[in-house]
Image (cartoon, rainbow, N blue to C red):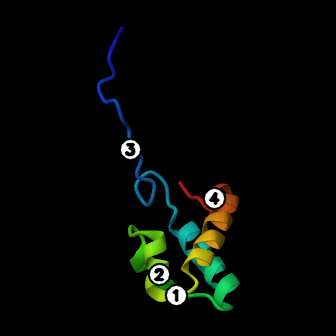
Amino acid sequence: MSRLRWPTVIFDLDGTLVDTIGLIVASYQHAFATVLGHPWDEAEIKTWIGTSLIGAMRRVAPDHADEIFHHYTTWNEANTERLIRQ
């Protein structure tokens, strides 16, 4: 039996293998608009990329973070194939 050289492989998609910035921003915008009734500032959203989703949501809307997270992840999953760029 041959052994794998590396037993684990990690993929870094955001800006490394594929461009998901537009998807991330659109997912945040959808979630904030759905829950709070308005989108969030795109420039500020971009500063959150690479940090915890729920952490960013708790910082800006602590009373609604769980609901925003739910809408973000649901919309993101449904739109990943359409919005991801290579």
Q: What residue type is labelled 4?
A: Thr
The answer to the question of whether label 3 and label 2 lie on touching residues, with beta carbons closer than 8 A, is no
Q: Residue furthest front?
A: 63
Q: Earlier in the sequence, mark 3 or mark 2?
A: 3
Tag 2 residue: 58
Whole-percent x and y of residue 15?
A: 43, 60
State the separation of the CA atoms marked 3 and 2.
27 Å
Tell me: 45 left or right of 5: right
> What is the tally of numbered marks visible in this picture?
4
Tag 4 residue: 80
Tag 1 residue: 61
Please state which of the two labelled residues, at mark 1 or mark 3, is closer to the viewer. Answer: 1
The answer to the question of whether label 1 and label 2 lie on touching residues, with beta carbons closer than 8 A, is yes
Whole-percent x and y of residue 21?
A: 50, 68
Q: Which amino acid does label 2 sit on?
A: Arg
Q: Residue 10 carries which label?
A: 3
State the separation of the CA atoms marked 2 and 4.
23 Å
Secondary structure type for disc 3:
loop
State the separation of the CA atoms marked 1 and 3.
31 Å
Q: Residue furthest top?
A: 1
Instruction: Check the image and report above or below for 18 versus 29.
Output: above
Instruction: Check the image and report above or below for 34 versus 14.
Output: below
Residue 71, located in which quarter of the rendered image?
Answer: bottom right
Instruction: Check the image and report above or below for 63 versus 25.
Output: below
Tell me: 52 left or right of 26: left
